[in-house]
Amino acid sequence: MKQLNWDEAQHIISDKKNKNKVFFVVFTMHNQFESAVMEYIYDEIFQDFKNEGNVKCIQIDIDEAKIYQDLNDKYHILSVPIFLIIQNNQIKKRGIGFYPKEIIVDFIEEHL
């Protein structure tokens, strides 16, 4: 799982050369039960797509990002864990809380 700081992740996501890539971005919180449960599923998804050139998987620590519950931030991260599927610098899907792996994989694949 590739963990980046939020500034670096935003730079990669907004880079015009990545406009056709699908970004699977997960926000988790250290020592939070729900995040710990979903991290196992996220790890499996990251492994499934690690050789897919058009999918980039990124994990962000919400405490480091300093955007948690910031209503002025365009991503509106009001609860964790949360994942975003971003393509062409636009949020295509958002998932809050528990999601089965199969559903998340379907969300990613529908944008490939």
Image (cartoon, helix red, strand yellow):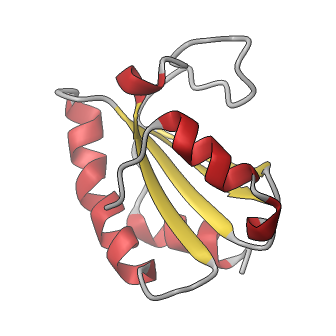
Image quadrant containing the N terminus: bottom left
In the rendered structure, the answer to whether residue 88 lies left or right of residue 27 reads: right
Image quadrant containing the C terminus: bottom right
- Residue 60 can be seen, yes or no: yes
Residue at coordinates 54% horizontally, 44% vertically from top-left?
8
Residue 56 percent across, percent down from the top left: 54, 68
Residue 11 percent across, percent down from the top left: 65, 46
In the rendered structure, the answer to whether residue 71 lies left or right of residue 43 reads: right
- Seen from the viewer's position, the closer of residues 11 and 68 is 11
Residue at coordinates 67% horizontally, 68% vertically from top-left?
22
Query: Which of the 4 quarters of the picture holds residue 106?
Result: bottom right
- Count how many numbered circles sit on residues in the image: 0
Query: Which of the 4 quarters of the picture holds residue 94?
Result: top right
Relative to 70, say whether 41 is above or below.
below
In the rendered structure, the answer to whether residue 54 lies left or right of residue 45 reads: right
- Seen from the viewer's position, the closer of residues 108 and 66 is 66
- Residue 95 can be seen, yes or no: no
Relative to 74, say whether 7 is above or below.
below
Residue 99 percent across, percent down from the top left: 44, 53
Residue at coordinates 39% horizontally, 45% vertically from top-left?
98
Residue at coordinates 41% horizontally, 80% vertically from top-left?
50
Query: Which of the 4 quarters of the picture holds residue 109?
Result: bottom right
In the rendered structure, the answer to whether residue 20 lies left or right of residue 71 reads: right
